Amino acid sequence: MLFGKISNILVTPEALNDVLLIDVRTKEEFKSFHIAGALNIPITTENGYNANFLNELEDLNIDKNKKMAVICRSGARSSAAAKLLDKNGYKDVVNLKGGVERLAKEYNYKFIKE
């Protein structure tokens, strides 16, 4: 089986451009603040791993060749999600290391708050 490409890069505001952004934090985390345009598909739930993660993504009919970036709070969950996406045929996946914490601390990033 051929796998795609996973890039692991430190998150910057520029890294958010021209990608499909998947925020894998919980629904509650996402509601508290998020990046404009991000899709929220949690990799975990209050009970652990979200077994429906791939199904939720596939229900959106996203082209598996589309460049996508995965983000979470710090980079751990997004790394796991990126590996899962790669194993399931997504070809161009970027894990944004440092997550929303880095955007807030290093760049004073302006998030959407609900």
Image (cartoon, helix red, strand yellow):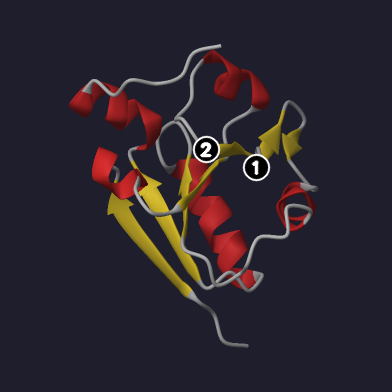
Q: Is residue 76 visible?
A: yes
The image position of residue 103, as x and y in percent, is: 29, 30
Looking at the image, which residue is at 34% across and 58% down?
A: 8
Give the amino acid at mark 1: Ile
Cα separation, mark 2 vs mark 1, equals 14 Å
Q: Which of the numbered marks, if any, corresponds to residue 38? A: 2
The C terminus: image quadrant: top right
Q: Residues within 10 Å of mark 2 (few under 14, many from 20)?
A: some
Residue for badge 1: 43
For marks 2 and 1 on the same chain, the one whose residue lies earlier in the sequence? 2
Q: Nearer the viewer, residue 66 or 2?
A: 66
Q: Which quadrant would residue 106 be assigned to in this image?
A: top left
Image quadrant occupied by the N terminus: bottom right
Q: Nearer the viewer, residue 59 or 10?
A: 59
Residue 81 location (% of width, % of height): 57, 52
Instruction: Report whether residue 12 is seen.
Output: no
